[in-house]
Image (tube, rainbow, N blue to C red):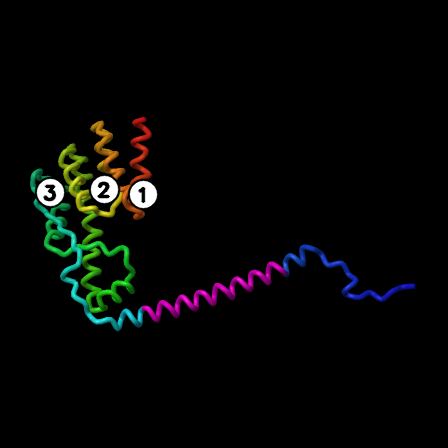
Amino acid sequence: MNLPITFTSLPVPYFFIAFVIFIAVLAHRRRRQTRSQQEANENFLEQERIANSTRKQDISDLDYLHFDIDALPINEYPHESLTSCEIVLVELSMRKIINLSDYTNTQLKRMYGPANFKTLSACDDCYQILCEALHTYADRQLALDRTEAAAAILEYAVSLNLEYSNIYVLLAEIYDKQSEPEKIRRLIELLSGTDKKYAAAALKKLETFCVNEA
C-alpha cells in the first residue's frame, strides 16, 4: 500500500536548517545594531543641543602650557633647516597653548560654551604643533651633529610633560648612544606613571634599550 507523501515526511537537510538559523540570527543582530545606532545618534544630538546652549565660561585660568622660548638654543647655530623650526617655535611662544586631546568637541562646548570653542581649538592645535616642532628641531640638530643641543631640546620637552611619544624615543636613542642607561630608566619611570596612549607607545620602544643592555 502506497502512502501519500507529505512535506513533513521529507528529510530536511541539516545545512538548510543551519542556514535558516544563520539568517535569523543575522537579521536579529542587524535590528539590534540599527536600534543601538539610532539611540547613539539621538544621544549625540541631545548632547550637542545641550552643549550649544551652554553659556560662555571664563577660560582665562585654564592650565595653559608655559612655553619658554629662552630654554631653547635659538639662533646658536645658523642653518636653514634649523631656522625654519625656530620661526615656528618663536611664533608659538607668543600664543596660548593647551592640551585638550582628552575631550571631544561636544565636551569642550558643554564645559566652556560654544563661543569659546574656536579659541580653545586653536590653543589645542598649537599644542600639537609644538610637540612636532620640538621633535623636528631636535632631530635636525642631530643631523648636524649637534647632539648636546638636541638632548637639551628634548629634555626641555620632557619637562613640559608633552604627550608625544617620538620625543621620548628620540631622547632615549641619544642616551643609548651616550651609554647612559640610567637616564633611559628615568624616562621609563616617568612614563610608567601615566596610562595615556603616547606613554604606552613610548614605553614599548624604551624598554628595548634596557633589554639590549641586559
Residue pictured at 11% horizontal, 42% vertical: 72
How many other residues sit within 10 Å of disc 2, few (<14), some (14-19) or many (≥20)?
A: many
Residue pictured at 11% horizontal, 51% vertical: 93
Going by the numbered disc 2, the residue's amino acid type is Ile
Label located before the other in sequence (1 or 3) = 3
The magenta stretch is 21-47
Going by the numbered disc 1, the residue's amino acid type is Ala
| Residue 117 shows in this picture | yes
* Above or below, 193 relative to 113: above
Q: On the image, numbered disc 3 is attached to which residue? A: 72
How many other residues sit within 10 Å of disc 1, few (<14), some (14-19) or many (≥20)?
A: some
Q: Residue 201 carries which label?
A: 1
How far across and how far down the image is residue 109, in percent? 25, 66
How many other residues sit within 10 Å of disc 3, few (<14), some (14-19) or many (≥20)?
A: some
Q: On the image, numbered disc 2 is attached to which residue? A: 167
- Dot 2 falls on a residue whose secondary structure is helix
User: Magenta segment, principal secondary structure?
Assistant: helix
Would residue 103 be counted in the magenta stretch?
no
Residue 199 lies in quadrant: top left
